[in-house]
Image: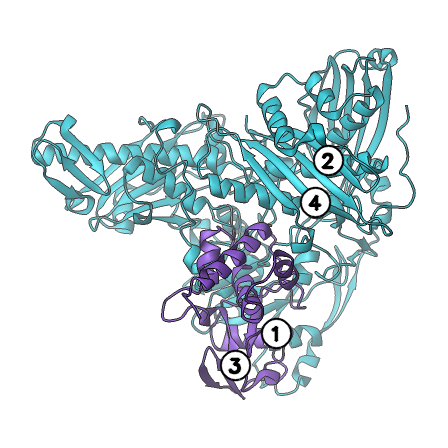
Chain colours: A cyan, B purple
Amino acid sequence: MLEVERYELFEGPAYRFALERRDFFKLLGGGLVFLLMCDDPASAQESGRGRGRGGEPLPQTVGGWLHIGEDGAITVYTGKVEMGQNIRTSLAQAVAEELHVPIASISLVMGDTDLTPFDMGTFGSRTTPTMAPQLKKVGAAARETLIDLAVEKWKADRASISVRDGKVTNAATGESIGFGALTHGQQLLKTVDGAAVTPADKWTVAGTSVPKTTARDMVTGAHRFTSDMVRPNMRYGRVLRPTAFNAKLVSLDTKPISAIPDVAPNEVSVVHDHDFVGVVAPNELLAAKAIAALKSEWKADPQPSAKELFTYLKSHPQPREGGGRPSTGEGAMEQALQSAAHKLDASYTVAYIAHVPLEPRAAVAEWEKGKLTVWTGTQRPFGVRGELAEAFGIPEKSVRVIVPDTGSGYGGKHTGEVAIEAARLAKFVEKPVKVTWTREEELTWAYFRPAGVIEIRSGVTADGTLTAWEFHNYNSGGSGIESPYDVANRKIEFHPTQYPLRQGSYRGLAATANHFARESHMDDLAAAVGLDPLEFRLKNLKDARLRAVLQAAAAKFGWDKSKSDSTHGFGLACGIEKGGYVASCAQISIAQPGGKVKIERVVTAFECGAVVNPEHLKNQIEGSVVMGIGGALFEAIEFENRRVINPHLAKYRVPRFSDTPIVETILLDRKDLPSAGAGETPIVGLAPAVGNAIFHATGMRIRALPMAPNGLPNLHSQPATN
Amino acid sequence: MELVVNQKHYRLQVDPDRMLLWVLRDELELTGSKYGCGEGQCGACTVLIDGAPVRSCITRASTVAGKQITTIEGIAQNGRLHPVQEAFIQADAMQCGYCTPGMIVSGVGLLRKTPHPSEAEIRRAMEGNVCRCGTYPRIVAAVQLAEKLMNGGQHA
């Protein structure tokens, strides 16, 4: 079941794909075009969405297409984007598998609003479960059509025709022909909504560790990220930032710009449009000097600071109805709590953290005859197209957004602010303009993973059977909020609140916070009843897939032999999210004095159905573990007086080589199950596994993320009330 | 000023305050060196100056005039990848690839100074390079693999 976080419910434009047959061949040249039609609601949510009006059912819409040109070139068009999750390679693998061609002969056009079909965006670990199977169908249909063409050409028996290594061969005669020659003179447009695809246990290309197709460009520096792009006559733009969040411009003095040494007249342009102030200069240094020279006054209302954040979230419910997630529950909670042998009532907090994509937001914009083209690294090219159209009051067809393979996102690049800024400046100077955010801008004016407060009340019987589970999440979100454990009486609720900082998606969404709270709490319950944490979980867990990863991780880790002492701790955690099943075991050491926590070893067992590319899947899991360390131990956005006070990498610490433990992964390859995405879920078990390891070493239960920004606190945290 | 980049000589009229990174990127169109933080904290901008890794985002171009500057574009020779580059591909030591040029240049600089680094030495030497995608274990493995490839005699 597709679960969309509330801040991911971006409305796609009311849009019906309008390209007609002749348009395709005008765009692509002759040959064969295979249109992927999708009517399954989960994929329509993501791709090719054309909303029915006035309650009409969703129409079948185009999710992607594949073109085989007269030169034999095979090109796949998808609205998905590549930001390091490696789908440019894995999607090519999916097509190569079905078309029986080498992977290098397939190129992908991705995330270009003029060339690719509408797509909601690349998020939610949806590419592998939705786009990959769809493209497999297209590849399979293309293969069958090529066979049809060969049958017709050679008047041959269909059974003797096969497709191998980019050629169509007649086994009866030994004749063979390349795709290009076979499609020559054709203008064939086919729609595909189903074709037999190769089952996972017969995969030869998919399911293997094909190297990243763009690896050579990455290691030579040849790949052009958005921030590397240069257009003829391009200028450099910067935007004046307010002195505080939500501030209004009171006054602006641009005269000091003319006093900058060595600035020729008209070399720097200033654009002032309401609260938007930007400059355009011939190089980045001059743009920076010009921004610094501007004198401005701003006015802003007070807002809460980090130190009162959690009280604020608890006391400011969202007045708007419908933004939340309905409470789920069953049973008689109070009765169950009263009759429990052990009761636990605890509260957890999660700080705001930043994505810190190493490539900050960047955009290059140019206008030509009223048409706006913007290159920008976003996870939602079509969404950003809509934002640009709205910002400039022009139709969407007058806007083209192109997403070069991007320097990561992790959920942090859904929006189009930098695209709008570059476009506004380019419009004024009538030249292409590039805007690249500074790290300080990225750490202040982007959006953050929501902070939150989580409260849990629970009860267990004397033998360790979970009987009551009440879970409330304030602001951080509903992802991963449902418990996988069996419990007769439960109530689970997400409460949207007002919040002080701009917030949005982040790798794994709220599943990290919800797993941190739940799995920390489960460990406390295990301790309360005197059971081993693994035994206690298994006792209350029926889900076979989750049990399998938990047991696999524990076996590899050597859980039964792991005995914590005051300087070494061992902890585990598990969970289900976005179709993936994860269990994490962590070993930590605590330096004395100072209480610095070092994660020494992490074992992650992961199962996401049939594995498409084992090496890249491991890479994603390892990356999740390493990224998870920051949020678990030390990352937090600090803010007061309406400003972020640590907007630099020197102050906002991200994981480095020295923070990295031995990372071991176990893949449970279930060829009998559909593939789920894997870019997010492996992150959710890390923080609670580390917290549990700290608890087993010290007896100290830390209920706040990050847990040890300055080493472990000297004081024991508040004990849970029994 | 005169800059010697990847063994080519460039005569440039630039503001002496400009940081080397931006001169490389915007004047010479050598965009392989990346901006990540502008404060020497992430290593995405790393280049070699006379063989030693330096953060080009906090290095004024005027201070390295006449010195040997090597950027990621100058690491492969005649279309042949350097063993460190080969090793990064073989070890799948990248995700988004944005930190990769800086990582490779730091790795090349390390192996030049310390041809047989221990794992601890690799981690220490690379500590100033950030990979937000978290591929650190693979990067360590890649540098170790590069050391083996180099001892195979491919690059003296």
Mark 2 and mark 1 residues within 8 Å of each other at the beta carbon: no
> Depth check: A152 or B52 in front?
B52
Question: Would you name the residue on which mark 3 appears?
Answer: B68
Task: Rate crowding at label 2 as few (under 14), some (14 to 19) or many (20 or more) other CA atoms within 10 Å.
Answer: many
- For marks 2 and 1, give the one nearer the viewer: 2
Say what secondary structure mark 3 lies in.
strand
Residue drawn at the location 25% of the way across and 38% of the way down: A189
Q: Are the residues under badges 1 and 4 in a single subunit? A: yes
Specify the amino acid type for callout 4: Glu
Quick one: label 2 or label 1, which is nearer the N terminus?
A: 1
Quick one: label 2 or label 4, which is nearer the N terminus?
A: 4
Mark 2 and mark 4 residues within 8 Å of each other at the beta carbon: no
Tell me the distance, in whole angstroms, between the alpha carbons under discs 2 and 1.
45 Å
Q: Are the residues under badges 1 and 3 in a single subunit? A: no
The dot on residue A688 is: 2
Quick one: label 1 or label 4, which is nearer the N terminus?
A: 1
Say what secondary structure mark 1 lies in.
helix
Question: Would you name the residue on which mark 1 appears?
Answer: A287
Question: Would you name the residue on which mark 4 appears?
Answer: A600
Mark 3 and mark 2 residues within 8 Å of each other at the beta carbon: no
Tell me the distance, in whole angstroms, between the alpha carbons under discs 2 and 4.
15 Å
Quarter holding the N terminus of chain A is top right
Q: Is residue B21 above or below residue B94?
A: below
Residue drawn at the location 53% of the way across and 57% of the way down: B144
